[in-house]
Image: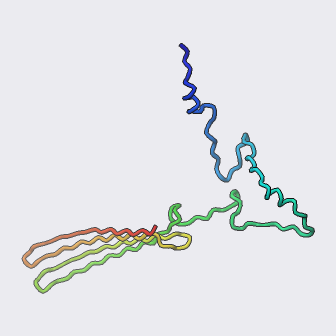
């Protein structure tokens, strides 16, 4: 018995061709690659060159908005490649209060706030607020109550 693959499987897998090779955008084509295929011309595109040539100075159009890729200097923005920048604030608040009934309250509060903006036009993207609160209440009879809480609030506008 001969070991021949099923022709339907061979056609489905397509052993005859390889995947196209990828190139970096700024580099030219591989030396083995031919020139890119040309688009078929339409009738309106063929009619345009038949206009009579002008005499005098020639006009050169310069596109300043999109420089050539190989000569362009890519600007870097803050935000780890996402085009975002962050502004952070941190506050600490400490209070001690004594009430008339002899209760004493010591409170420590830490607030961390982070706001994200787009680096190009300063549009507000996200706000994140983390509040950490620790309280120690000592009553007149000696009872001590310790409470702590952490709250995180995140508002995103995307």
Q: Position of residue 11 (x, y in %)?
A: 59, 31
Residue at the top extreme of this rendering = 1
Q: Residue at x 27, y 78 (%)?
A: 94
Which image quadrant for residue 121? bottom right
Q: Position of residue 22 (x, y in %)?
A: 63, 45
Q: Residue at x 13, y 80 (%)?
A: 103
Which image quadrant for residue 154? bottom left
Q: Residue at x 76, y 50 (%)?
A: 40
Residue at the right extreme of this rendering = 55
Is 50 or 153 nearer to us in this picture?
50
From the viewer's perspective, tell me whether residue 26 is left or right of residue 57. Answer: left
Q: Is the residue 41 above or below the residue 64 in the image?
A: above
Is 36 or 47 nearer to us in this picture?
47
Residue at the left extreme of this rendering = 141
From the viewer's perspective, tell me whether residue 35 is left or right of residue 4. Answer: right
Is 31 or 103 nearer to us in this picture?
31
Residue at the bottom extreme of this rendering = 100
From the viewer's perspective, tell me whether residue 129 is left or right of residue 124. Answer: left
From the viewer's perspective, tell me whether residue 96 is left or right of residue 3. Answer: left
Q: Position of residue 6 (x, y in %)?
A: 55, 24
Which image quadrant for residue 155? bottom left
Q: Position of residue 148 (x, y in %)?
A: 23, 69
Q: Residue at x 70, y 63 (%)?
A: 67
Coloring scheme used: rainbow
Q: How many marks?
A: 0
């Amino acid at each position: 018995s001969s070991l021949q693959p099923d022709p339907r499987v061979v056609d489905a897998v397509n052993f005859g061709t390889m995947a196209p090779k990828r190139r970096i955008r700024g580099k030219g084509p591989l030396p083995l690659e031919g020139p890119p295929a040309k688009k078929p011309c339409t009738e309106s595109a063929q009619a345009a060159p038949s206009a009579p040539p002008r005499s005098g100075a020639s006009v050169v159009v310069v596109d300043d908005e999109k420089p050539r890729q190989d000569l362009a200097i890519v600007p870097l923005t803050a935000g780890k490649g996402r085009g975002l920048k962050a502004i952070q604030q941190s506050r600490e608040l400490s209070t001690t209060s004594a009430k008339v009934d002899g209760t004493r309250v010591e409170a420590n509060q830490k607030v961390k706030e982070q706001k994200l903006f787009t680096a190009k036009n300063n549009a507000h993207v996200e706000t994140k607020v983390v509040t950490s609160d620790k309280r120690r209440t000592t009553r007149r009879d000696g009872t001590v109550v310790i409470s702590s809480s952490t709250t995180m609030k995140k508002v995103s506008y995307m």
